[in-house]
Amino acid sequence: MAAELTSTKLNAENHLLLDQPLLKLPYELSRRNFKSVQRLVEREKDYTLPALKDAANASLANTQTPDQTIAALDAMISRMQGLKRKMEGLHQEEKKIHDQSRKRIHHLESLHHIPSLADVKYDQWSRVRLDRLIVDHMLRSGYTESAQQLAKEKDIEDLVDLNVFVQCQRIAESLRRGETKDALQWCSENKAALKRSQVKTNCCTQYNLEFELRLQQYIEIIRTGDRTKYVDAMNHAKKYLTPYIDTQSAEIHRAAGLLAFPRDTRAEPYKSLYAPERWSRLSELFVRTHHELLSLPSRPLLHIALSAGLSALKTPACHSAYTSSSSNSLSTTTSVCPICSTELNELSRSLPYAHHTKSYVENDPIVLPNGRVYGQHRLLEMSKKVGCVEAGKVKDPTTGEVFAESEMKKVYIM
Amino acid sequence: MDLVQKEHERLSKRLKANQGIKNVQSTIDLLQSARDAIAADPSQASITLAKLQNPVKSSFDSINDSLKETHSGLNKYSKSLDKLFKDRPLPSTEHDVLSSHENLINRAIAMHLLREGQFSVASTFLAEMTEKKTGIPEPGSESISPENAATLLNPEEVPSNEVRKQFATMYYILHELQENSNLLPAIQWSRDNKEILQARGSNLEFELCRLQFVWLFHGGQISQTPVASGRQAALEYARREFHVFLPRYLREVQQLMGAMAFCPNLQDSPYQNIFNNPSAWADVAQSFTREFCSLLGLSADSPLYIAATAGAIALPTLLKLQTIMKAKRTEWTSQNELPVEIPLPPSYLFHSIFVCPVSKEQTTDENPPMMMPCGHVIAEESLKRLCKGSRFKCPYCPSESHPREARKVFL
């Protein structure tokens, strides 16, 4: 069944597909925040209650001087104050996140009040969305400065996640430089969440970020070639690698084997363990894990939107060897198709073109002797406007040839 | 969406109440008062401490309770989010052709920024791009494969200074036009490109001059010409400038002159439309932008914008398709064509589309549309199949023709 050829209907709910991360990310952040509050409280509780009990018991048994009791209480108070301070910090952060979410919800909500795709408001909304998508793309590709500037100019800082990506890029960058510290710290901060996601997606994510990082540290120790350090390496392996023996036994065995091979070995798989490319793979793994944890899509939203959009717009004429009569830059009667425009032409070359089941031409098509088809009305209008055409003649806007009006021939397109 | 909003509001309210921190404070108060009591009267220490146990414990419990509430609020919020986006996963990442064309995307973005007039952002972006490109190539750090590297070095790939300059000119002219009601730079530009514009059949120069006339008529002042103003200035302007337009725009010029007679009562005259057109400036600005971009071989609206918007419109359909294909385990049969029709707003159709009425396929370079002498058009492949080399009847009318007589047409 043929669908409608054109439509300006706007289904807001469906339309928000691309905008899921907009709300999901702040949610993940605020959950993370909540978890840290919970952890803090738990820790203080575990300290204060027993301490208080001990103090009471000691005081009852008279094994403690009042000064000691007061000192114990002071310690408790200062810890509780520390807790309060930390909670207040997190609370501020939480507030910021909520503010952001509110603005985002409002932004998405406003789409529901736009009646159709032809509405001017939709145009504005969609432009904001494009800016968001561009910022998202820039952030993911590491063009942080540009992203910040664009977000600021367009006043959409609350609709994009600058900080999250900046942090992510910083750690990814440090990994590329060959430093594991930041990444490991990130791992320990998100330990619980990581564990959960590992369980959930164990079958598809073969790699465990923390394990890989520790393994890399181990490799780096051995890379020094200094035999005296091998003991360190083995200790390191015992401490950090063996806990993963259930899932990563093959890698651990390989790591043990690595001890026997010098760093310039040609034997696989040890050669690839020594390979410096391992760092960039680690960096990619980190980015992937990071995005997964925050339920961010793995590729830039702009790519998703573009690949769908380019295909929907593309026609066989866009990469044709012949200039299209209906859309080219040679006359004012037509506007340049975005796919034909130089910016996107190369990009869309490899994509499929849109499917159509009905012809779509002007309703008064005529053909000129050179085989070009135009809408008659528009062609006549246009010839009138062009200066150098005598009465009774028409000019082909694409090729510039001039024909007599009588040479126009009706053409039937079904 | 409403649900999400409601849950979020509830969550924020709880956050504002800030119960957790208050409870912590009350615990601190408890401990503090006990400490003071003991300091004041050491003999009561054990009793005070014993009394302290339960209140502290219960205040911790209430901290936990408030945390639990927050937790359930978060859960509800998350559920409402899931509901909003349910069954709408983002498209799978299997065939991401675009990620291999990173530099092309970046180029498109840079062009977009330039044509939106975001010059400072654009230059930052270009600088960061070159920095990344020329940055010390750590072994294997960037995914620059050999052919990518080749295109990166190609100066064509990044918008050159020339393009940037062009857009800067465009924005200067637009700025003058919109902010200062100064049409002169625009008129100058249209004169410089007169021949091309005329060949395109563009009215831009005349439109600009006509607006200038109207503007003078309404009392616009050019600082250099202090004498005449209002009608007089307009008339002088017309005498000076309009004669070049006479061959092509005789009627329009006559209209403008005729309006002079109605000067005291333009509101009720037939010329009201020309002289009091509130959108005239915006229209002229728009047609100027269009012409300017067209001369550069670019579309008037940012292609990136149109493509991204079309993408957002198309995505739901494509996703539905993906789920159906997965459920039925069918494959995509047409290699370089999308399998479904995607309804876009009419303004998103740029090319004429010809679908052969016989084969129901779109025509391409290899299979172009052919017109038979009777004026009906079908695709070349259909034609060959129908005629089998000899005379044949048109499938849509009684006329017969020979395949040799069919001619290729361009839509």
Image: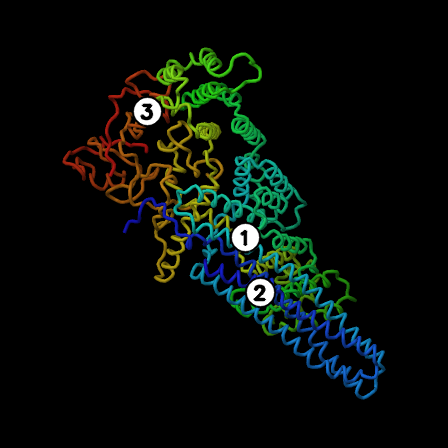
Three-letter amino acid code at disc 1? Lys
Three-letter amino acid code at disc 3? Glu
Can I make out residue B248 in this image?
no
Residue situated in front as seen by the camera: B351 or B97: B351
The picture quadrant where one finds residue A121 is top left
Q: In this rendering, would A74 be left or right of A337? A: right
* Relative vertical location of residue B346 with respect to residue A274 in this rendering, above or below: above
Residue shown at the point (34%, 44%) measured from the top left: A6
SS class, disc 3 = helix
Measured as percent of width and height from the top left, residue A38 is found at 63, 70
Q: Tag on residue B14? A: 2
Counting other residues with Cα less than 10 Å from the Cα at mark 1, is it few (<14), some (14-19), or many (20 or more)?
Answer: some
Q: State which quarter of the image contains the N terminus of chain B.
A: bottom left
Q: Which residue has dot 1 on it? A: A103
Three-letter amino acid code at disc 2? Arg
SS class, disc 2 = helix
Residue shown at the point (53%, 22%) measured from the top left: B185
